[in-house]
Amino acid sequence: MASIRIWKHYANSRDGQVHMLSAKPENQEASPKTPLICLHQSPMSGEVFEEFLPVIARDRVVHCPDTPGFGGSDRPLKVRNGGKANIENFGLGLADALVELGYSEDNPVDLFGFHTGSLGAIELTRARPDLVRRIILVGIPYYPAVQRPVMEKRFVTPYAFLTDPTYVPDMYARIVLNASNDLSNEERFEAFLGRMRAGPNGQDGPDAVWSYDADEGLSELAALNKPTLFLAFNEVLTEPHKHAHRLYFPNAPLIELSHLPMEGFKAGPQDVADAIRPFLDG
């Protein structure tokens, strides 16, 4: 496998700094392809792509930014001033960071958006379509408008780190000790640490997701006519994701990697890289 350089760094945005984990081949002649931007789920950070990076970055530059407000990135000014987090803020802040890194209409990027990151990819593309060449969407949290208030009521609850002494141990038991998913104990612990790092601000993710008009976002993305690939793992959002595909992108390719769990890029990074490379290299 090609030698890969991995580093961490910052780029500026309208809301402050965006932190990111990046990788590229040590041999610069081996990376002539369009750079790939990987956008994570909430309340995690770009580090969720740590296993994926050395595989997908063997022939291209890859950046994994922390969504504004998560990981090492500054929280959006609107939220710091008392406003509600929204996906549009995430997309605008990430677009600013890409521009500072030197990306433009003449030097565009490809996007890989997972869960919350899939909506961030949509908004980044809507805000700056000139920056984006191709898009891969994974696990879109798509529910019809009538269902979104129900989902918001179900999932948007205060992160009671500062008020409930049982909150952290209960979270640890639920996410790590008693979880019924396909993740390893190490991966469950990583998920717990991501929520701990986000602290009370972790609620920004659900707030943004369930207040987002996914129908408007998907329809406008489709109208932009960007080459788009839908990738599906075996997870809770598989059916909502495939429903969004049927409604708005019926002619776009859909690749199902049903042997991989929710974070398929961690469990099977080579399988995911092999599945998406033909699309990215097209």
Image (tube, rainbow, N blue to C red):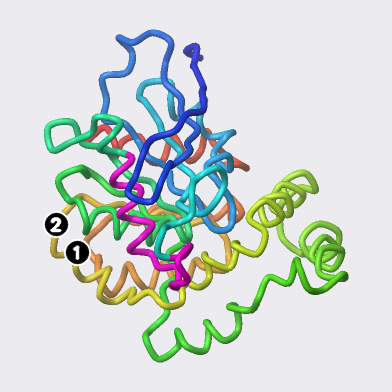
168 within the magenta span: no
Circle 1 is placed at which residue position?
Answer: 222
Q: Secondary structure at mark 1?
A: helix
Q: Position of residue 13 (x, y in %)?
A: 34, 44
31 is higher (above) or lower (below) than 55:
above
258 is higher (above) or lower (below) than 30:
below
Residue at the (45%, 88%) spot, across then down: 147
Callout 2–callout 1 Cβ contact below 8 Å: yes
Q: Secondary structure at mark 2?
A: loop
Circle 2 is placed at which residue position?
Answer: 225
Frontmost residue, 264 versus 186: 186
- Separation of marks 2 and 1 at Cα, in angstroms: 5 Å
Q: Position of residue 182 (x, y in %)?
A: 71, 55
Highlighted magenta segment, given as a residue range: 79-97
Please tell me whether the stretch drawn in magenta is mainly helix, strand or loop.
helix
The dot on residue 196 is none
Frontmost residue, 89 versus 279: 89
